[in-house]
Image (spheres, helix red, strand yellow):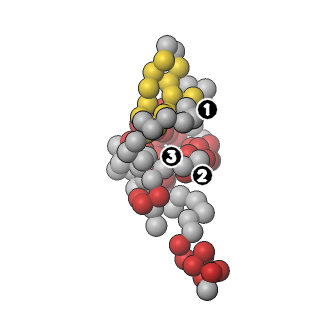
């Protein structure tokens, strides 16, 4: 029974065709030349200025619009900023695995 529940309800990666969003308590904050993704509840700050040549802020802006799927974001990043799809998809998966993407928007 436990294996069935794990297979049915555990999300291993972000689905390609579902709209994704960040948890509402995350925000992007500027500090000098750097940008950080931080929680209003404190904790670790993710320095987004240093990620994939400063393009992670573009990915986060698209996710924050709450209207794009993982594949749509990947397509936009490639067509507008020449970021390879596998890089964008990996960033989205890492954001999810580290708890930034809202699970209730998935599955």
- Say if 68 sits above or below 18 in the image: above
Numbered disc 1: secondary structure = helix
Instruction: Farthest residue to the right: give it.
Output: 3
Residue at image coords 56%, 46%: 95
Q: Earlier in the sequence, mark 3 or mark 1?
A: 1
Query: Separation of disc 3 and disc 1 at Cα?
Result: 17 Å
The quadrant in which residue 50 appears is top right
Query: Separation of disc 2 and disc 1 at Cα?
Result: 17 Å
Say if residue 97 shows up in the picture: yes
Q: Which residue is mark 3?
A: 100
Q: Earlier in the sequence, mark 2 or mark 1?
A: 1
Graded by Cα atoms within 10 Å as few (under 14), some (14 to 19) or many (20 or more), the crowding at tag 1 reads few
Left or right of 94: which side holds 105? left
Contact (Cβ within 8 Å) of mark 2 with mark 3 = no
Numbered disc 2: secondary structure = helix
Q: Which residue is mark 1?
A: 52
Query: Separation of disc 2 and disc 3 at Cα?
Result: 8 Å
- Say if 29 sits above or below 76 in the image: above
Tell us which disc is closer to us: 2 or 1.
Answer: 2
Residue at image coords 41%, 59%: 105
Instruction: Farthest residue to the bottom: give it.
Output: 1
The quadrant in which residue 84 appears is top right
Residue at image coords 57%, 35%: 44
**Coordinates of residue 11 in the picture (x, y in percent):** 56, 65
Left or right of 62: which side holds 14? right
- Say if 22 sits above or below 29 in the image: below
Residue 4 is marked as none
Left or right of 24: which side holds 99? right
Tell us which disc is closer to us: 3 or 1.
Answer: 3
Q: Which residue is mark 2?
A: 97
- Say if 56 sits above or below 101 in the image: above
Residue at image coords 61%, 32%: 52
């Amino acid at each position: 029974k436990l294996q069935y529940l794990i297979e049915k309800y555990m999300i291993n990666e972000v689905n390609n065709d579902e709209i994704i969003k960040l948890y509402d308590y995350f925000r992007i904050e500027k500090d000098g030349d750097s940008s950080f993704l931080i929680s209003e509840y404190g904790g670790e700050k993710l320095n987004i200025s240093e990620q994939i040549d400063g393009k992670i802020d573009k990915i986060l802006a698209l996710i924050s619009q709450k209207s794009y799927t993982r594949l749509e974001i990947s397509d936009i990043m490639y067509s507008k900023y020449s970021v390879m799809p596998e890089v964008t998809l990996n960033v989205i998966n890492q954001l999810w695995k580290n708890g930034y993407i809202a699970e209730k928007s998935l599955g």
